[in-house]
Image (spheres, rainbow, N blue to C red):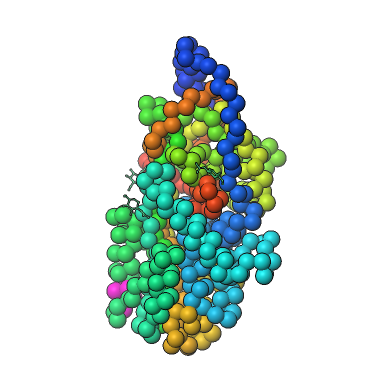
Amino acid sequence: MLPRLSVCLHVFLPVLLVQGSKTTSPKKVPAAPASPPPRPPPPLGDLTWALGLRLYKAVRSESTPVNTLFSPLLVASSLGAMGGGSAGTTASQVEDLLKTPSSSSSSKAGAQVRELLSGALKSFTQANGTTFHLHTSSAVFSKQAPSVSQTFVKDSQAKFKLQHKPLGKGDSKADLKLLRGWVKAGLGGLEGAPLETEIQARSGALILANALRFKGLWKKQFSVKSTDRRTFLGKKYTKVEMMHRAGLYRFHEDMENMVQVLEAPLSEGKASLVLLLPFHVENLDRLEKLLTLELLSKWLEKTSAMSVALSLPRANISSTLSLQKPLSALGLTDAWDQKVADFSGVSEKSKGKLHLGGVLHWASMELDAQAGKEDVEEEMLDKPKLFYADHPFIIFVRDNATGALLLMGALDHAEGEPLHDEL
Ligand SMILES: *[C@@H]1O[C@H](CO)[C@@H](O)[C@H](O)[C@H]1NC(C)=O
Ligand SMILES: *[C@@H]1O[C@H](CO)[C@@H](O)[C@H](O)[C@H]1NC(C)=O
Ligand SMILES: *[C@@H]1O[C@H](CO)[C@@H](O)[C@H](O)[C@H]1NC(C)=O
C-alpha cells in the first residue's frame, strides 16, 4: 500500500502549482457561468453502442483477452452494406444485429438504419485532421465470385466507403499476403497485429475487412514536463510513461460499483473519449459483467464538469480480430453457409455460391499527450479528484454530433519494460 500512497502525493504536486499560478494571476476574473454545451444522444437507443457492447462481450468471452479494440461504427456500417446486398433470413439476421434492444422489429427498416450509419460515418471522417488523426479503410474481398453487381459496388462505396476487391486465384497464403498489404496501406503504413486464425477463402467467399488507426487530439494538452515513468499494473507489471494533466473534465464516481467514469473532450469538441476505471487494481472481468446500455447511459448522464487530476499511460491499444465466431454467437448464422446464404443483391448468380467467408478487423489507437488547436480558455480548479489510470481500463470514443460509438476497447496490458520485482 505504501508505494501507491507516495505515487498519489506526486500527482498532486503539479496540480497545486497550476492552482498557485492561477491565484496570483492579475487577469483572474470570475467567469460567467456558461450554459453547459449540448450533450450527444445517450448510448441507450443507439445501434452502434448496442452492437459494440454485445460484440465486445462476445469477443472478450472467447479467450483470455490482452487488449481489445474495434470500431462498432465501422463493423455496423460494413454489415449494413452487406445487409443491403442480401435478402431473406440472411438480411433479417443482419437487421437483427443492427437493432437496439428497445426498437421493435418494424420501427426502423434496414434502409433507414443504413442511412443513419452512413450519416454517422460521414460525421466521423469529417473530423479527421482537427479532432483526431484517422486512417481507415473498408473492403469486401471476393474469392472467385460470380460477377458482382455494379449497383451494389457503387452504393456501398458511396455510402459506406466499402471498396470491392477481388482476391486472386492463388492459395490462402497468397490471399493473406494481399490482405496484409491492404491492411498496411489502410493503417497508413503501420504493420497490423497478425491474424490469429487462418483465412481459408473458398470459391464464392466474401471477406469483409476493416482497418482503422486512430490518434485523438486533446482539447487541452497534457503537460510534457510532468510526464514521468511509472508502473502500469496490468497483466504484467511494466514501466510506462505516464502523462498528467489537471483540468475540468466530466466525471462521475459510482461508489456502489466502485468505478470512475471520465469523459475528456477532443479538440473542437467533435468527439470525446470516455474512460471507465475500477477504483482498485483488478482485471476487467468485474467491470465487464456490469456493462449494460442502461448503466452506461446513466453513468454518462451523471458525469459533471469538475476538477480532475488525470493521469494516463502513453500507450498503443491494438488488436486484430476475426469476428466470425462472435457474430455467429450473436445470431448471424446463415450468411456463412454457402447453401443458405442469400446475397442476391451482390450478384445475380449468387445462389449456392456467395457466402460470407470472414469478417476481419484491424484497429490501433494511440494515447498520447498531443492536443489539436489548443483551446486557451482558463479553467478554475478546486481540489481535484484523482483519476489515476495505472491499471486496466475500458475506453470509448464517441462522436459528438450523432452520439455514435466510433471505438470501443480495453487496455489490459501496456507495452513497456517488464518489472521483475512484482509481488
Ligand atoms: C455537439 O453535439 C451537439 C448535439 O449532439 C450539438 O448541438 C453541438 O453543436 C455539437 N458541438 C460541436 C462542437 O460540434
Ligand atoms: C485523414 O487525413 C490524413 C492526412 O491528410 C489522410 O492521410 C487520411 O487518409 C485521412 N483519413 C481519412 C479516413 O480520410
Ligand atoms: C505507438 O505507436 C506509434 C506509431 O507506431 C509510435 O510512434 C509510438 O511511439 C507508440 N507509443 C508507445 C507508447 O509505444
Q: Position of residue 422 (x, y in %)?
A: 47, 38
The reply to whether residue 70 is in sight is no
Q: Nearer the viewer, residue 190 or 32?
A: 32
Residue 80 position (above or below residue 277): below
Q: Is 257 placed left or right of 358 in the picture? A: right
Q: Which residue is drawn at 48% across and 83% down?
A: 344
Quarter of the picture holding the N terminus: top right
Q: Which residue is drawn at 55% across and 69% down?
A: 111
Residue 5 position (above or below residue 356): above
Range drawn in magenta: 171-175
Majority secondary structure in the magenta region: helix
Q: Position of residue 364 (x, y in %)?
A: 40, 52
Q: Position of residue 357 (x, y in %)?
A: 44, 76
- How many numbered circles are shown? 0
The reply to whether residue 45 is in sight is yes
Q: Is 276 placed left or right of 85 in the picture? A: right
Q: Nearer the viewer, residue 326 or 34?
A: 34
Q: Which residue is drawn at 31% across and 59% down?
A: 184
**Magenta segment: does it hold 286?**
no
Q: Residue at x 38, y 57 (%)?
A: 136
Q: Position of residue 240 (x, y in %)?
A: 40, 38
Q: Is 44 placed left or right of 359 in the picture? A: right
- The part of the image, by quadrant, that contains residue 256 is top right
Residue 14 position (above or below residue 133): above
Q: Nearer the viewer, residue 82 or 353?
A: 82
